[in-house]
């Protein structure tokens, strides 16, 4: 039996922070209002409300908007609608053909595959997120978790060590979670 470890998903706010810039998502007025209300609902774990607001925002845009699709996928994942979440992440990737910000949906797609215990496939999606943005540390953390779940502890520890580089003085919640995972034995029965 494998002890459960938790993958870490990203949202569009992390997307903006991870590129080292904080700039607003430029959406028309009504869409921006719906999007902001949906983000607040996500923060309160009100996934059905968020999903409703995000669906309305997508209708208003009339086109696939990556930020909205990423957060819709997050709401769907948290509602247990994994296949639909994957479809949202695929649509977000297709809506960003130049791969500027597709690392978030690649990572989140990997998270969903990890939840489904498809760790080999999850690892490939985390690697794709890292190909698009080699500095996206959440994907590196998740790749380590996938490798750990696959029993590849040495490779997993390399990911965890790289995740910790230059962060020893500024441990975040995720760093603490990784430290616990790294110390934990994966029990296979």
Image: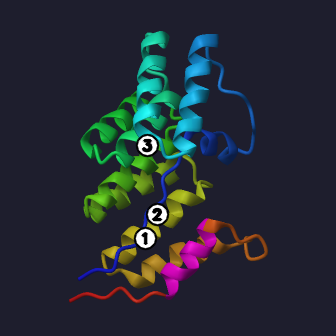
Can you see residue 95? no
Q: Is residue 127 magenta?
A: no
Circles 2 and 1: CB atoms closer than 8 Å: yes
Question: In the visual, does 44 lie left or right of 6?
Answer: right
Q: Which residue is mark 2?
A: 142
Crowd tier of the residue under label 2, counting other residues whose Cα lies within 10 Å: few below 14, some 14–19, many 20 or above = many
According to the picture, the residue beneath numbered tag 3 turns out to be 74
Cα–Cα gap, marks 3 and 2 = 16 Å
Q: Residue at x 42, y 13 (%)?
A: 59
- Whether residue 187 is situated above or below residue 174 in the rendered picture: below
Give the residue displayed 25% in from the left and 87% down from the top: 188
**Label 3 vs label 2, nearer the camera:** 3
Q: Disc 3 or 1, which lies upstream in sequence? A: 3
Numbered range of the magenta stretch? 174-183
Query: Which of the image's four quarters has the N terminus?
Result: bottom left
| Residue drawn at (44%, 18%) of the image | 56
Quadrant of image for the C terminus: bottom left
Residue 85 in the image: x percent, y percent? 33, 40
Q: Is residue 133 above or below residue 28?
A: below
Magenta stretch, main secondary structure, is helix
Is residue 182 or residue 73 the one in the foreground? 73
């Amino acid at each position: 039996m494998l002890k459960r470890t938790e993958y870490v998903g990203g949202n569009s706010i992390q997307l903006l922070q991870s590129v080292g810039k904080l700039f607003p998502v430029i959406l028309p007025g009504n869409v921006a209002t719906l999007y902001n209300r949906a983000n607040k609902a996500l923060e309160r774990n009100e996934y059905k409300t968020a999903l409703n607001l995000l669906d309305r925002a997508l209708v208003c845009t009339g086109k696939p908007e990556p930020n909205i699709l990423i957060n819709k996928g997050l709401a769907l994942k948290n509602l247990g609608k994994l296949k639909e979440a994957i479809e949202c992440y695929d649509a977000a990737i297709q809506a960003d053909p130049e791969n500027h910000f597709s690392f978030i949906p690649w990572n989140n797609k990997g998270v969903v595959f990890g939840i489904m215990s498809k760790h080999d496939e999850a690892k490939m999606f985390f690697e794709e997120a890292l190909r698009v943005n080699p500095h996206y540390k959440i994907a590196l953390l998740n790749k380590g978790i996938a490798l750990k779940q696959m029993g590849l502890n040495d490779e997993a520890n390399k990911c965890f060590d790289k995740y910790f580089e230059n962060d020893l003085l500024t441990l975040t919640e995720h760093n603490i979670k990784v430290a616990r995972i790294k110390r934990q034995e994966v029990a296979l029965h």
